[in-house]
Amino acid sequence: MNVTLDLRCGISGDMLLGAMLHWYSKSSDITDVLTSIEEASSAISPTKVSFGTVERHGIASGRLEVKWRSDHDHIKADRLMGHLRRSFEDSGIGRTGREISEKILRRMLEAESIVHVVRDPMDVHLHETGTPDTIVDVLGIGMMYELLELDSCWVQATPISLGYGEVDTSHGKLKVPVPAVRAMIRDVPVRGGPVSGELATPTGVAAALVMTEIWLDQETGGDMSEIHGERVGSGAGKREYAPPFRNALNIYLEDPR
């Protein structure tokens, strides 16, 4: 089976996890999965995870919402990795999912260490990525990768849309894509736009890099290209845009036989 991640509207951790949950929820009850993710991520700070369906320009998409205490202090990378590893025991995630989750977080931390000029990625002091929603996304994506049995599929992806403009961060305003994303996209097909804003986040890009085996080029994965297969899952981003831009990540499944 071929699985295609349609990243022409960008990618964030919550968009990808939302699309995977949307796919899985069509055939299975996701209540236990959400409870496991919520309980495991609360090790950092009390966290609430909810999932629902929204319409984006007439098409249903999954929407993941994560809330945590606003007084949570940002943490160092080694503590975040420790929280993730402890969350494995609380969630019941298997070996395949653990490997995917840890690879995603490590890819993010390596990018952050480049940006902060720190030799050991575990010594980086994290800001936006040092929060409970990072554990939710990274753990959840690993769990869903395992439950959807994606290790038995060929996973391919379209070029990543990055957006443009500026985004507010703890370091002040940064140009899009933010430095951690720029450090990760050197060898993959990307494009600026097609709308303003941050369309590709560090968590999302790290997950795409870990999961994707084949990257489509601009010709075969561009705006006018048809993605083969059935759209099985869709994950909506936080912001809503005017048509035709949906701000949703789609997953397609194709049986090439």
Image (cartoon, rainbow, N blue to C red):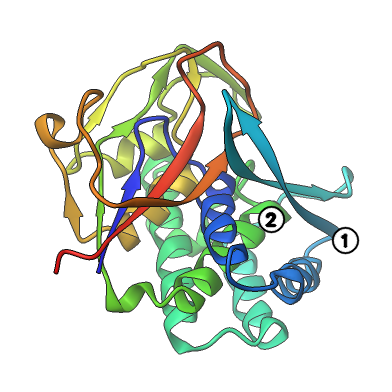
Residue placed most toward the observer, 34 or 178: 34
Q: Residue 146: image x %, image y %?
A: 47, 78
Q: Residue 121: image x %, image y %?
A: 44, 59
Identify the residue at image location x=46%, y=11%.
Answer: 165
Sequence-first disc among 1 and 2: 1
Are the residues flagged by discs 1 and 2 in contact, CB closer than 8 Å? no
Residue at the spot of label 1: 46
Q: Looking at the image, can residue 63 be seen? A: yes
Does dot 1 land on a helix, a strand or a loop? loop
Identify the residue at image location x=25%, y=41%.
Answer: 227
Where does the N terminus fall, quadrant-wise? bottom left
Residue at the spot of label 2: 75
Q: Name the amino acid type tagged 1.
A: Pro
Count how many numbered circles sit on residues in the image: 2
Identify the residue at image location x=66%, y=30%.
Answer: 170
Q: Which mark is residue 181?
A: none
Q: Name the amino acid type tagged 2.
A: Ile
Q: Residue 94: image x %, image y %?
A: 52, 88
Does dot 2 land on a helix, a strand or a loop? loop
| Depicted 90 relative to depicted 48: above or below | below
Residue placed most toward the observer, 213 or 119: 213
